[in-house]
Amino acid sequence: MIDFWLANAKLAGDGGEYHVRYSVDGGEAKMIDKWQPIWLSGWADGKHSIKLELVDKNGNVVDNGGYNSTTREITVVK
């Protein structure tokens, strides 16, 4: 599950002007426009990386001291 917390920003689907862009393992980036958890499935065993970025209406990462773009690594074991 991808879940995040926003402060002082609204996503486009919630009446704001921002989006959260995410990608898994460097794959195709997808956009989140409403502030709600996103469930991912189909994981293969092994290490995976998930990147989240807060972007403006033009797709540019919002500069906030490096806090609006983050990557996390997870390990899946079945």
Image (cartoon, rainbow, N blue to C red):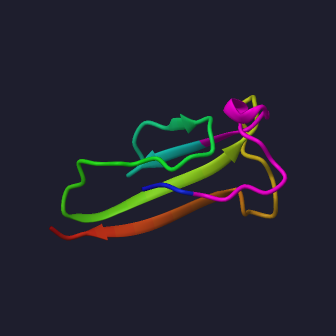
Image quadrant containing the N terminus: bottom left
Q: Would residue 6 be counted in the magenta stretch?
A: yes
The answer to whether 5 is drawn above or below residue 75 in the figure is above
Residue 50 image point, x, y percent? 45, 56
The residue lying at 79 percent from left, 34 percent from top is 16
The answer to whether 16 is drawn above or below residue 78 in the figure is above
Name, please, the residue furthest toward the right: 8
The residue lying at 82 percent from left, 58 percent from top is 64
- Can I make out residue 67 in this image? yes
The residue lying at 48 percent from left, 66 percent from top is 72
Of the pair 70 and 32, the residue shown nearer to us: 32
Magenta segment's dominant SS is loop
- Can I make out residue 59 in this image? no
Name, please, the residue furthest toward the left: 78
Residue 62 image point, x, y percent? 77, 47
The answer to whether 22 is drawn above or below residue 49 in the figure is above
Which of the 4 quarters of the picture holds residue 13? top right
Residue 69 image point, x, y percent? 65, 56
Image quadrant containing the C terminus: bottom left
Q: Is residue 11 left or right of residue 45?
A: right
Magenta segment: 4-20
The residue lying at 77 percent from left, 42 percent from top is 10
Residue 46 image point, x, y percent? 23, 66
Of the pair 33 and 77, the residue shown nearer to us: 33
Of the pair 5 and 68, the residue shown nearer to us: 5
Q: Would residue 70 be counted in the magenta stretch?
A: no
Q: Is residue 18 left or right of residue 39?
A: right
Question: For the image shown, how many numbered marks are present on the structure?
Answer: 0
